[in-house]
Image (cartoon, rainbow, N blue to C red):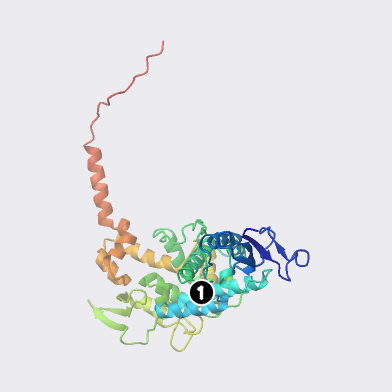
Amino acid sequence: MILRAQRRHARYCRYYGTEVITENLNKCECPCVVSGTNPRTGTSYDKMALHTLDRFIAQQKVRELEETGIIKPPEEQYTIEEAFDRYTMILTNRRRKEGTHANYRTLYNSLQEFADGHRPKIKLLREITFAHLTDWIGTWELKDSTSAYRQRVVKKLFKDAFQMRWIPENPAFLLEPPKGDESGQTMPFDLDGELPKIREALPHWWSKRTNRRGIWSFHPDTAIGLVTLLDVTGMRWSEACVFDPKDPHKLRKVKIGGQDIYCYFARQKKTGHMAFTPLKPEQADLILNCKWLSSKYPFWNGRTGTNEWNHRFVGGCLRHLEEVSGVPHIRPHRFRDSFAVDLLSRGVDIRTVSRLLGHKSVKNTLDHYEHYIKSDQDKLLTTLLGAWAMEKPRKLKNVVEFPAAG
């Protein structure tokens, strides 16, 4: 009898008891074994484990056994929990940020819940197939943009696991993240239309939250201070969240041209570059005189992770600011983009904008905002108008004229 792949039915399988071994690999997802005699070596195998549940991998291993007479030793068999714990150590060695660890931990909790509820139960990371991943992703109730981000994290995780030989094949190789329409969620605000509406509605944003209970409902002046900080400074959310006005090395009051100006210096976590932020006194009053949410930070409780805090801020404060102002898709980073675009539209030098944003290189600023530079736009229009003025009628060759009617 030649070598052939079979399945050994487990107790949880509906075929258990009728046929202990079956050659139909499509019936279920029980462990695969090999039986028969190798025609090359004459070696017989009786239900030898192939260490896989995937029928394609099982058939490939049987062909390898026929050609070489050996089966490669199985990869390290980690449970899902063990694999994530080891991967967390790898991320730590790679000096990944705390937010990256939180993202992978969220994915682990979701994947573990799916694996525990699957029948048959999935215990090992190497048992996860492409079909399992698609079923798991189908249980997510997320926006397209969030789902796309998580799928990129999943692909990175399984790619690394495959390269480290934790799994025989990469089941996430064929995953295609959704390409949903973000509907302007990452675009700057309209400086003449949307931004004035937001600033006008800001003092009244909590008017529709009288029957809702949440931290921003009880601290409307804090919410106003945080939105004002994002609006007038162009800070990233991660920097605004841990804004510390008590530090004299970061916030200084100086007098320039007879006018008091608050200057804020802070090292950016993302780039490691120093950012300089000037504040007008009336802006600083809204930011500095609001009620603080913790003893150290005015806009953060100091306990919740910054990613989760961002979700609460967007879902609690900004969502209702959208209702009051009528401006859709208000997100923290849109204030940063609008801050940069507003300065560039007023003719501010790109290097100055780069310094205010805390970019490590002017190239980063150019990559994001080059098409908003006013001098470049004026030059482009002048060149185009000059070309139009010099335009002369030309004779076109190879033109076939239609015969006159009649």
Most distant residue in the right direction: 18
Residue 110 is situated, as x and y percent measured from the top left of the image, at 59, 72
Q: Residue 113 is drawn in which quadrant?
A: bottom right
Helix, strand or loop under label 1: helix
Nearer to the camera, 224 or 338: 338
Q: Quadrant of the C terminus?
A: top left
User: Can I make out residue 389 in this image?
Assistant: yes
Q: Amino acid at mark 1?
A: Tyr
In the rendered structure, the answer to whether residue 34 lies left or right of residue 98 reads: right
Q: Quadrant of the N terminus?
A: bottom right
Residue designated by label 1: 104
Q: Residue at x 25, y 56 (%)?
A: 375
Residue 351 is situated, as x and y percent measured from the top left of the image, at 25, 66
Nearer to the camera, 269 or 195: 269
**Mark 1, other Cα within 10 Å: few <14 / some 14–19 / many ≥20:** some
Nearer to the camera, 199 or 22: 22
Residue 187 is situated, as x and y percent measured from the top left of the image, at 42, 60
Q: Eyeballing the image, is 225 above or below 183?
A: below
User: Can I make out residue 241 in this image?
Assistant: no
Q: Eyeballing the image, is 35 above or below 401?
A: below
